[in-house]
Amino acid sequence: MTAKAPNVLIVMADQMAPAFLPVYGHAMTRAPNMLALARSGVVFDSAYCNSPLCSPSRASFMSGLLPSRTRVYDNAAEFGADLPTFAHCLRLRGYQTILSGKMHFCGPDQLHGFEERLTTDIYPADFGWTPDWDRPEHRPSWYHNMSSVRQAGVCVRTNQVDFDDEAAFMAERAIFDIARSRDRRPFLLVASFSHPHDPFAVPQRYWDLYRDSDIDMPAPAIAPEALDAHSRRLRRVCAMDAEPVTEAQVRDARHAYYGAIAYIDDLLGRLMAALRSAGLAEDTIVVLTSDHGEMLGERGLWYKMSFFDGASRVPLVIANPGRFAPRRVAASVSLVDLMPTLIDISGGNRQSLGIAIDGRSLTPHLDGGAGHDEAIGEYLAEGAIAPIVMIRRGEFKFIHSPADPDQLYDLSHDPGERDNLAQNPTCAAVVADFRAEVGKRWDLAALDARVLESQRRRRLVDAALNKGEHRSWDFQPLRDASKQYMRNNMDLDDLEAMARFPSIGRPPN
């Protein structure tokens, strides 16, 4: 690694759909820090997650592998400690690797290559949320329901506000700790927040950024009987038909979601200000993204778990004006592409690592050239009854599952994905080509069997581990109070001089 290897700050939101961001053309939401970052960086207009659910998406984001290869099929599947991540790869390159906030790792390994983790996670690390494809009619209590919409509104505090405030403070402090440290290694810092994920509740000052009359409402819903088969299952899984919501509740949910975007924007602004104050901004590449999107009432659907753009498309901005000229990229890319990109950015050589990666580096796009135009997705979790796969390339998106009719959308003419062309005779050759590609890419019968086997194993293990004394895998941040602030084994003047930034040196005796 050369002395000029750049620092990397990744800011990840949760369930933040690009359609509701000013960076992508939304006229109302307030996100000036995101806009400033986008104006100085490379904006990907067609970026996708690889699975529209938290844990599978994040495992793919970190490993560069699709869920069928990470085996992180759902929100309770173990992310194997033997799978290399970009944190491992940059750590090998000599980086200090730090995580603050959410990453939803399931299993005993709660670091996955991070040298330091500053907070616990907001979600559990065990197998308790394992879906059950053996009983597709069964709806577990931990699935989404419509309470997040029906109870949307103003709060003073929530579980998520508590978590994100802590994650932001710890990340901000880490930036200053790096600046004050004698450790000259470049850093990879991931600051990962839980907003604007439901429940849709925000403090008053974020709610007051918008008037009720300004909140745009979803496009007319598709009648339940006209929905695709997977969307009908999602309506049942999330109890959307059992708990209908009013127009006022829909408006409140969107109002709070827009407020939560402004909150995330403030947290981004704090971290950007910290980089500037610490003198680190010039040498730091900043990445802004999300793990998946949010339907927010569009098509009559909420949350994620489908391959419609509302759920599966993500924001992606990569910025460092000294390295990348600002531009917008129309080609489709996905989160698995970040691992090989970060290896390239660090000066590494992916081939020399001898590991398989499904993603492709974004450096051709960042350098102003013509990179790849493809995003691949897999969904293997609740609401599905068999694997669902997606191919996004050119103007088309193709969605296939052995259990359901195919879907084909021409997003250049139908961005709302209202016209399924899979049965249109004029598209028969396109559908045939996509189906042939699916057959070459996946053995869906074998994948289905692996998912079912994994679910059965995890349900058994979870049942056993909940008998007798329970021992948690949840990450416990270790802070040695004897080494914090001022202690009597430290020299006061040395301590104060070291902690002050910018440094003024040790005062004379």
Image: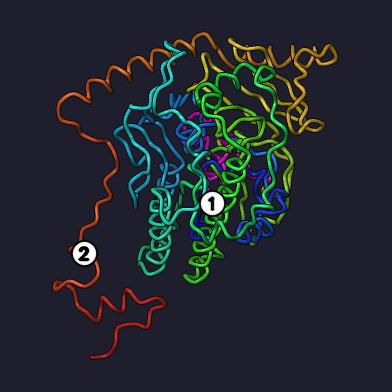
Which residue type carries mark 2?
Lys
Residue 260, disc? 1
Q: Residue at x 36, y 33 (%)?
A: 106
| Sequence order check, earlier mark of 2 and 1 | 1
256 to the left or right of 219: left
Q: Disc 2 vs disc 1: Cβ atoms closer than 8 Å?
A: no
- Per the image, label 1 sits on a secondary structure element best described as helix
| Magenta-tinted stretch | 336-365
Q: Residue at x 49, y 12 (%)?
A: 448
Q: Residue at x 64, y 15 (%)?
A: 438
**Along the line of sight, the residue nearer the viewer: 413 or 432:** 413
Q: Quadrant of residue 108?
A: top left
481 to the left or right of 158: left
Separation of marks 2 and 1 at Cα, in angstroms: 36 Å
Can residue 142 be seen at all in this image of the molecule?
yes
- Relative image position of residue 134 (x, y in whole percent): 42, 10
218 to the left or right of 172: right
79 to the left or right of 494: right
Q: Which residue is drawn at 38% across and 17% down?
A: 454
- Relative image position of residue 300 (x, y in whole percent): 64, 30
Residue 109, disc? none
Q: Name the residue that disc number 2 marks.
A: 483
Look at the picture and state if 457 lies above or below 304. Answer: above
**Along the line of sight, the residue nearer the viewer: 255 or 403:** 255
- Relative image position of residue 261 (x, y in whole percent): 57, 52
